[in-house]
Image: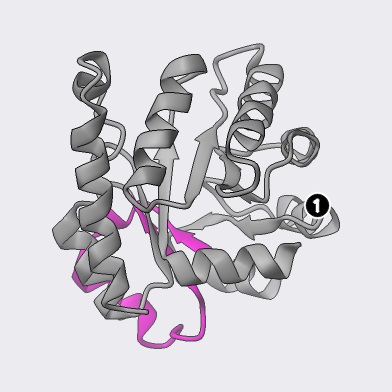
Amino acid sequence: MREATREIIEKEKLIAIIRGIYGEELVELSKALYLGGICCLEITYDQKDKDTLSRIKKEVETLNEVFQGDLTIGVGTVLTIEQVINAKKAGAKFVVSPHMDKELVKEAIKQDLVSIPGAMTPTEIVEAYLSGADFVKFFPAGTMGYKYIKDIMAPLNHVKYIATVGITEESCFEYLKMGFAGVGISSRLTDRKLIAEKNYSELTNRARRFVEIAEKFK
């Protein structure tokens, strides 16, 4: 399963990151993004929520039931081994962390989950790669800027990177052009105002624009 999931992520190149959206809104948003061509979703833990384990488990199970395997669903903001195991039990296919922890990478691999730890420095990136991570989430890519990223990627061009933070249609193109394996998109595809207005068609249109960009690099 891990190898198949890795291939899907690398092929699709786009992961929609959904934070703090649950229940019917999450299902409707997921349907809108899927209609626009987005096939990979990351549903994140909320570390302030004491019920985040059970809540996220329920949401992942619901999405798997609704989409019957057509969506590749992962869990993000994973900080503990317990959270990795919970994601696996829920039916997630990959786990994403904001940081690098080799024990979490090891546990993800043990659970047959694609591992995507976050890293910012050369030391963290190399540690993630040597620990067996499938991808490295360059976090926060949008904050660090293109020059810093290019300088890092020059000697470490063998690593498969996922860019996150502030991803727009324009920056999506730039990151994929630079050789990133993919991007994680949040606010452009989870606009709270549009969701409140139930304007899911606009989110579908935005998803389509990202998919059109990704198609250029397949």
Q: Is residue 152 left or right of residue 118?
A: left
Q: Nearer the viewer, residue 173 or 153?
A: 173
Measured as percent of width and height from the top left, residue 183 is found at 37, 59
Where is residue 133, by image quadrant?
bottom right
Q: Mark 1 falls on what kind of element?
A: helix
Q: Quadrant of the C terminus?
A: bottom left
Residue found at x 72% / y 37%: 87
Q: Nearer the viewer, residue 35 or 49?
A: 35
Measured as percent of width and height from the top left, residue 35 is found at 36, 44
Q: Is residue 18 left or right of residue 69?
A: left
| 192 over 84 or under it: above or below | above
Chosen colour scheme: one colour
For residue 140: magenta?
Answer: yes
Where is residue 67, by image quadrant?
top right
Observer able to see residue 133? no
User: Which residues lie in the magenta part?
Assistant: 135-164
Measured as percent of width and height from the top left, residue 93 is found at 67, 50
Residue on which the image places disc 1: 107
Measured as percent of width and height from the top left, residue 191 is found at 24, 29
Residue lying furthest right = 110
Residue found at x 31% / y 78%: 217
For residue 6: magenta?
Answer: no
Residue lying furthest left = 170
